[in-house]
Image (cartoon, rainbow, N blue to C red):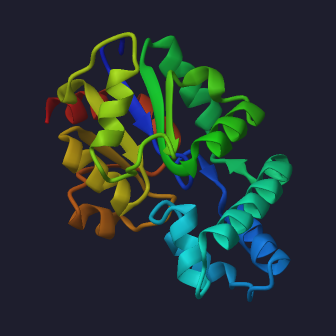
Amino acid sequence: MALYNKLFIFDFDGTLADSRMNIANSLNFALHQHGFTEVPHEEVYPLIGKLTLAETFEKFCDDLDAQRLDALMASFSDYQLSHIAEEIELFPQVRSTLAELDNRGATMAIATTKRTHQIETILAELGLAKHFKVVFGQGTLAVHKPDPACVQYIWDHLDTSFSPEQTVMIGDSEVDVKTAVNAGIHMIAVTHGTDTPDTMRQHGAEHFVGSFDELLNEELIENVFAD
């Protein structure tokens, strides 16, 4: 199936990659560096993709002023970008599926709560940057997912025009589902990430994939864009 008139917007954490260890380790490195109590990984994982980095630090640290928050975020960044290769693992079939979507003419973009510099560096390090025409990260605008302005930004920065009917969000959390609902676009939920299918279904998800290469299933894609 040719996909020249379709736009696929991907979340990153929990959708393209298992980055939980890297995020939790980066967070705790920063907390330790600046005299805060470290947090069990199990308390960090459910927040991934739902809170921005600043919001995450504010959740675990009392009385943060702007200077201390900036210092925490800088330490987080230093650790994260130094441990991409050993701590961020792409899910099975991600590379081959993205390559085939390219071959079929799909346009692809990223919408994540990761800071823009972080996600651009990670995509480049993992060899994925070539697949994505636009990367939307935290700091690109004053808002973040699930605000529909994130999707509008992507539409506005593509060479080709896409309508909501030609656009699908692929993500693993209720935030991704809400982003799709708010923007009036289609949604495909992956079941290997942060939220359960039931949680995502409660927020409006109707199409699910358990394996990443199911995104190449022509019947699924026809059904998604027919809704």
Tell me if I can see residue 217 in this picture: no
Residue 39 position within the rendered picture, expressed as x and y whole percent measured from the top left: 69, 84
Using the image, determine if residue 219 lies above or below residue 207: above
Quick check: 85 left or right of 62?
right
Of 117 and 110, which appears nearest the observer? Answer: 117
Q: Point out the image quarter for the C terminus.
A: top left
The total number of labels drawn is 0
In the displayed structure, 63 sits above or below 161; it is below
Residue at the image position 66 percent from the left and 29 percent from the top: 128
Residue 122 in which image quadrant = top right
**Relative to residue 182, is residue 25 drawn left or right?**
right
Relative vertical location of residue 6 with respect to residue 171 in this rendering, above or below: above
Is residue 101 shown left or right of residue 122? left
Name the residue furthest left.
227
Does residue 93 appear anywhere in the picture?
yes
Q: Is residue 171 above or below residue 57?
A: above
Which residue is located at x 30 percent, y 41 percent?
149
Residue 212 point in image, percent of width and height: 51, 42
Quadrant in the picture for the N terminus: top left
What percent of the width, then of the height, locates residue 201?
Answer: 25, 62
Residue toward you, 150 or 14:
150
Question: Is 33 or 186 nearer to us in this picture?
Answer: 33
Where in the figure is residue 126, as x and y percent of width and height? 74, 36
Horizontal arrangement in the rendering, residue 128 relative to residue 137 (left or right):
right
* Residue appearing at x 60%, y 68% in the figure: 66
Residue, x 42% and y 42% (percent of image)?
Answer: 141
Q: Name the residue nearer the viewer: 106 or 218.
A: 106
